[in-house]
Image (cartoon, helix red, strand yellow):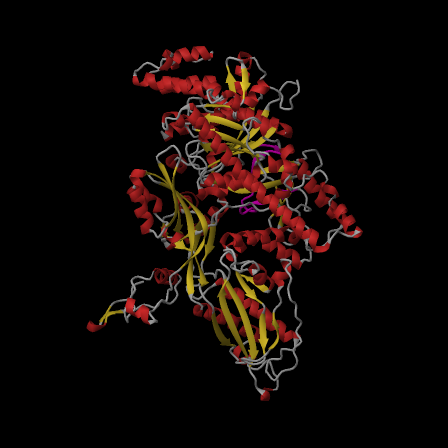
Amino acid sequence: HNGFISQTQHDAASGMEKAVERLSGLQKFPDNIRNICVLAHVDHGKTTLSDGLIAHNGFISQKLAGKLRFMDFLDDEQRRGITMKSAAISLLYTPKCAVGGDEAQPEPLLINLIDSPGHVDFCSEVSTAARLSDGGLVVVDVVEGICVQTHAVLRQAWEERLQVCLVFNKLDRLIVEMGYTPAEAYERMRNLLNEINGVMSAFVSEKFISQADTLLATSTEGGALDHGERDDAIERDEYIDDIESDVVTDAEHSTDTFSVERGNVAFACAADGWAFRTDAFAEMYASKLGCSSTALRRGLWGDWFYNPKTRKIVGRKAAGGKLKPLFVQCVLDPIWKLYKAAEAERHGYPPEGGKDLAAMAASLKVDVAEKDLKSADRKTALEAVMKAWLPLSPAILEMTARRLPSPTGSSKRRVHRLMPAPTLKQTLAADDAAALAASRKAVSRCDASEGSVTTAFISKMLAVPASVVHGKSTGAAAAGGASVFLGFGRVYSGALREGDVVYVINGAYDPSEPDDGSCEEIVVEELYLMMGQGMFRVKEVPAGNILAVGGLDRHVLKSATLSSSKMCAPFGNMMFQVAPIVKVAVEPESVADVPALVEGLRLLNRSDAFVEVGLMETGEHVIAAAGEVHLERCIADLRERFAKIDLKVSPPLVSFREGVSTTGSATVTTSNGLLTIKATAAPSPSFFPRVIEDSADSLKRILQSARQKAGDAADTLVPDIMGKLNKAREAVAIDGDGSEDVIKKTLSSAWSLGPKHVGPNLMSVGKMLEGERGRVIAPLGNPSVGEHLKLPVKTCENKAEKQNGIIDFSDANVVKTIEGNALTGFQMACERGPLCEEPLFGVTVQLEVYSKVDAEAGGDGEVGEAQYGPFSGQVASAAREAIRKAVLKAGPRLVEAMYLSVISTTSEALGGTYSVLGRRRAKVISESIREGTGVFIIHSYLPVAESFGFADELRQCSSGASNAQLMLSHWEHLDIDPFFKPKTEEEREEFGEDGYVGPNMARQLVDATRRRKGLKVEETIVKDATKQRTLSRKA
């Protein structure tokens, strides 16, 4: 089968070479280009739909469309039946009439189609595809409905400001599997459409509320701008007069995203090769019913009925419950009759109404080959009739041409997302500022004119076999070996040509400091048009087109901006829905293969947009992936393509966090005995860590703009973060619990966040004391986080007088040393907690410092530096130790990552499914039955540590009836004390004096993590004291 597919794909590639010339000629007309991606949950039919569209151009046979899965060219993809890598292909389509609506001859359109994965483990591929597109086709299985990844791809499309169309796929399942009547199927699809519009409406409302908060914050903060500020603002924004504002309009807020009447909803069965929109039926029935096709198009969805007596279309009230909706009568009934006739002929009994498939085909006036109609396989005959009557590709491509925007039409609304205004460290010269504005303006206009700035974005690096790269240079072939690295990207302005000199700009680039190492000059070596797995050489790619760029493997790691000008802002970061949580350590079977492993890991890191490769302190090479399937794919690539060596792979290394359950304090004195630091650790509000982690990028931008004294980022991002915190607090709050001011109280005194200054832990402003229990001399630190978040804070100056302590708190330099190094100690403690050296999570820390009182010391604060090292290092070390000890005294708890598990199963397999969930410590949230089916949907939280092999075990215990989708959800405290010992009388009575309470799950996880990291593990070696039998310590 694979050999047959390979031969077919080879024939297609030779045919494509002839098509590339014509396709590349169409690239010069951006108004006639459509860049679209296909988005859906796994197994909802994206790749099958893509096959049908590709067959329209004759690259594959119509009979193989839907079976070949042309865009799944990896062996793993064909074997598993799922897409793992995004792939692009260019198609030609001529609409029925001119897109502008005039009388002119329709011009051919170039449609760049990107097929993306639906499995949650490969969601990074969806991000890269969405970034390069202007529109999307969201495919939904009408039986399964909205699934986990459907929500995720709709969110992705919304975040990337894509216009989307909806395709209801697998309509045949409603007829064949579910046995629905046309009326029941109509109700099912109507409810689904309302549900999907509800999801999109929630995104719009979220943005709308965020904008309202921003407006309120800016209006109450300082009133109106004065004239000078207003003039500056106008002058600054003059160049973006043609860029649409990134503000949700009332129109967006009030109308449904998807509407059958507007023509952005299609109905399909991609596997059988047919699809339709209601406008096709409106034209078909308009003359029969004696009304205009425009009026009928409005009536073919919703509560509209045809009254044969009056020959009028009437509403629900006039219908009186006796008539069928027009959509059922005119659209679904004929389709159902065809399928029922084929079913009857297959089983040898007469069809309803006496008409067989051949008679129906004749009445529909469709041209079907005689041999297909008389085929012994009635399924083949049915497919032939449906393809001839309602062909798939014209319906979907016509919708794409009419309802999805061209690059010039979408650039204005997307430029805010694609190229955010950069935060500059220094003021630009007038010429440079004008050049920076010109580059952004060119992107907003998709300007392909001669002399405009060339700007392109590389969203990921592709590793493709050298055999599929046509017309590659000898150098590229020699360097690439079996695999060639190409940059998968799009030109947003200007035109990219072979031999052009461009700058490779990474995400940290600041146009005001062009020589800081984030900008590199290169010569463009090779440009390719992507046709599935085939790459075909072209000389030039104008703005608005998708391309592959060769020769970037030495300059681009994962993604980058290419520009012909140094005065160009980097493109914004892509949004990834999950984090790389599953890690393994890899090492070669033979020590001699270590260099090959290192080189293989470097290539793997470049080829996958999401994988993370690192080197641990123990010397182990670690690969971090999104999930089990993604990890398997990465290991296979490393073993077979990049390193080409035998590997030893460790059991999965699961990441944990460390938290606290109560309040605890600890005291540590510096090595020279001069300064004592008391740390108090307490749990943060439960909602706080998750929101802070999700807002890490926004916080980073706020802190960066605060350091550079540019308030633009804070003005827009602070209300967004505060809105998320308030929303999260309301979700967990109980009326009258007094938590209304908890956010303000927590953050208004916040000195720093950690780790990395944006983490989920918080250090409050501390105190400098006069002696151990003395009065407060001055605050330790300042509430800088509260200030950045525009909260009211109490600022206190250090008014300390000369004290009798050895450390002089009235000396500004001494205080600065203590504060700076206490902050360093806090960051170090947050990076590695005391349980198993994992980061802290949701811990609030406050420090108190006081000096040793010694009148004879003469106030020499440098005592012992020669013996104990610099005083600054002693403070940092003491602060770190004090915080770690305070965490141990505050009821330490392990915090583990949780997956949201969505399992679909049958009633017979429920018992086996629940037994698997019970063995793996899962918490079942809900169980529901899918309406009109016997399928149960179970939502549960599953610890990541217990998730390995979960899908296989689930299939085994349910005889293949249960399928699970896992998506990283949140971090949750494991409410077991890892050091539990019976202390109270009740505990001793329950657990005995020895206190054996069975296996302590938290302690087992802590010990396993410590053992893996090479840390000390406290184990009882003597198991049976009466016989004095000593067992050997096992690693």
Specify whether residue 543 is painted magenta: yes
Compared across the picture, whether 289 is left or right of 798 comes to: left
In front here: 120 or 358?
358
Q: Return the x and y of residue 355 as percentages of the image width and height.
A: 38, 12
Q: Residue furthest left?
A: 1027
- Say which quarter of the image contains residue 3: top left
Question: In the rendered image, is residue 358 in sight?
Answer: yes
Compared across the picture, whether 74 is left or right of 262 comes to: left
Asked if residue 391 is positioned above or below residue 1014 in the image, the reply reads above
Q: Return the x and y of residue 496 as percentages of the image width and height.
A: 63, 36
In front here: 24 or 651?
651
Q: Return the x and y of residue 749 as percentages of the image width and height.
A: 59, 65
Q: Residue furthest right?
A: 227
Q: Return the x and y of residue 228 as percentages of the image width and height.
A: 79, 52
- Say which quarter of the image contains residue 980: bottom left
Q: Which residues are magenta?
A: 538-563
In front here: 528 or 277?
277
In front here: 797 or 332?
332
Residue visible at 43% across and 23% down in the picture:
182
Asked if residue 757 is positioned above or below residue 816 in the image, the reply reads above
The C terminus: image quadrant: bottom left
Specify whether residue 666 is painted magenta: no
Question: In the rendered image, is residue 485 in sight?
Answer: no
The count of marks equals: 0
The N terminus: image quadrant: top left
Compared across the picture, whether 552 is left or right of 987 comes to: right
